[in-house]
Image: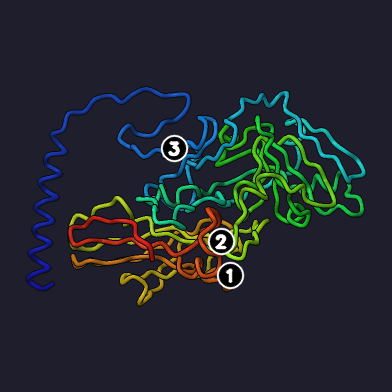
Amino acid sequence: MDKTSRRQALRLGAALGGSLGAAAQEPRSLGRPLSAYGERSRFVKPVRATRVTKTPEAGSSSTPLADTFGIVTPSALHYERHHAGVPDIDPATHRLTIHGLVERPLVLTMDEIRRLPSASRIHFLECGGNSGSEWAAENGPTVQRSYGLASCSDWTGVPLRLLLDEVGLKPGAAWLIAEGADACRMQRSVPIVKALDDAMLAYGQNGEPLRPEQGFPLRLLTPGWEGNVQVKWLRRLDVTDQPYMTRDETSKYSDLMPDGKARIFTLPLEAKSVVTFPSGGHTLAGAGLYEITGLAWSGRGRVERVEVTLDGGRTWVDAKLDEPRLRLAFTRFRMPWRWDGRAAAIASRCTDESGYVQPTRAELIEARGTNSGYHFNGIKLWKISPDGSVTNVHA
């Protein structure tokens, strides 16, 4: 050990010794008694940020991504998007109807659904409008405001294929129309190939029943696809030969292109990533060692690579990816960084198992223009000033 390292070790030892002495003299008292349902510490403050659109029942709340660890989002912090408020549904009276181009229509109770063979899988959900403000100049100041309409949970439910096998699909069955029990009767058209692949009728989230905001008692889960397709409070599946062309798959959740045409049914979400620390709103305490960390995901499959830039995109370095890396789920990435106190511009770039590479904002605008508020997956740049403050800027 050289003299400098020895001096640092001695200072650390002295500091620890003083801390231990102080801790030994702290007063002790009995803690609070047992509770029926666990609550987090009163010192933990992060909450969802809410945004109301037209009425109090229509709006969204975003996950504080910068304050979460690992890849699973706590149920109470999972993002929300509602079009007509949160219905109060008694599972004892709720029914799921499956009809249309089927041999044997069914009406199922929740007890009948829960007794069927089930599965649990970790998948992300992302609103098609997540990061929509990044198309324009008024981008969100924090990662919660700009990227917080994305979360990841451990979902439990019945594979939809099982029930479609039970009802028997008739020739010509190509789509199913999922309808919710909320006031607006949310409807989305889902290709039957997805329904027969990995779609799920979910009734559990992170080891307990769905929260009302997440569709209790039942929601459709179509992993890797935009959140609006994952119809909550699911009450009906109508098997058809064509899509219904509903409001939320034509005038909404579609992208108007520069030539006047519109991209519709852009269901699988493309590869995306964001640095969550340091990110907008943070202030670094001073030069020294930090860990850059963030999240990556893709509706095309598993995340294979995440690169990080410290100079605004001129050079890139591979980040470490936490295991396990699951398909259609968040992947946590990390990279140690010794900040020298000078200005920096950091961002991440994701590559998924299909070979798709997350584009820059400029590349997206060149391909699609700026007439959309949906499906933004461009590289997100954070600027770090010499005073340690971190702000949101465009790449």
Labelled pair 2, 1 in contact (Cβ < 8 Å) = yes
Q: Residue at x 88, y 38 (%)?
A: 105
Q: Quadrant of the C terminus?
A: bottom left
Q: Which label sits in the foreground, 3 or 2?
A: 3
Q: Residue at x 92, y 54 (%)?
A: 171
When asked about the image quadrant of residue 3, the answer is bottom left
* First-in-chain label (1 vs 3): 3
* First-in-chain label (2 vs 1): 2
Q: Residues within 10 Å of mark 1 (few under 14, many from 20)?
A: some
Label 1 sits on a secondary structure element that is loop
Label 2 sits on a secondary structure element that is loop
Q: Which label sits in the foreground, 1 or 3?
A: 3
Label 3 sits on a secondary structure element that is strand
Q: Which residue is mark 3?
A: 50
Q: Which residue is mark 2?
A: 298
Q: Amino acid at mark 2?
A: Ser
Q: Position of residue 40 (x, y in %)?
A: 39, 34
Q: Residues within 10 Å of mark 2 (few under 14, many from 20)?
A: many
The Cα atoms of the two marked residues, 1 and 3, are separated by 34 Å
* First-in-chain label (3 vs 2): 3
Q: Hey, which residue is sitting farthest front in the picture?
A: 260
Left or right placement of residue 33 versus residue 23 in this view? right
Q: Amino acid at mark 1?
A: Glu
Q: Position of residue 374 (x, y in %)?
A: 55, 54
Q: Residue at x 58, y 40 (%)?
A: 205
Q: Amino acid at mark 3?
A: Thr
When asked about the image quadrant of residue 321, the answer is bottom left
Q: Position of residue 369 (x, y in %)?
A: 53, 64
When asked about the image quadrant of residue 102, the answer is top right
Q: Residue 353, labelled with which disc?
A: 1
Q: Quadrant of the N terminus?
A: bottom left
> Residue 148, relative to residue 197: is it above or below?
above
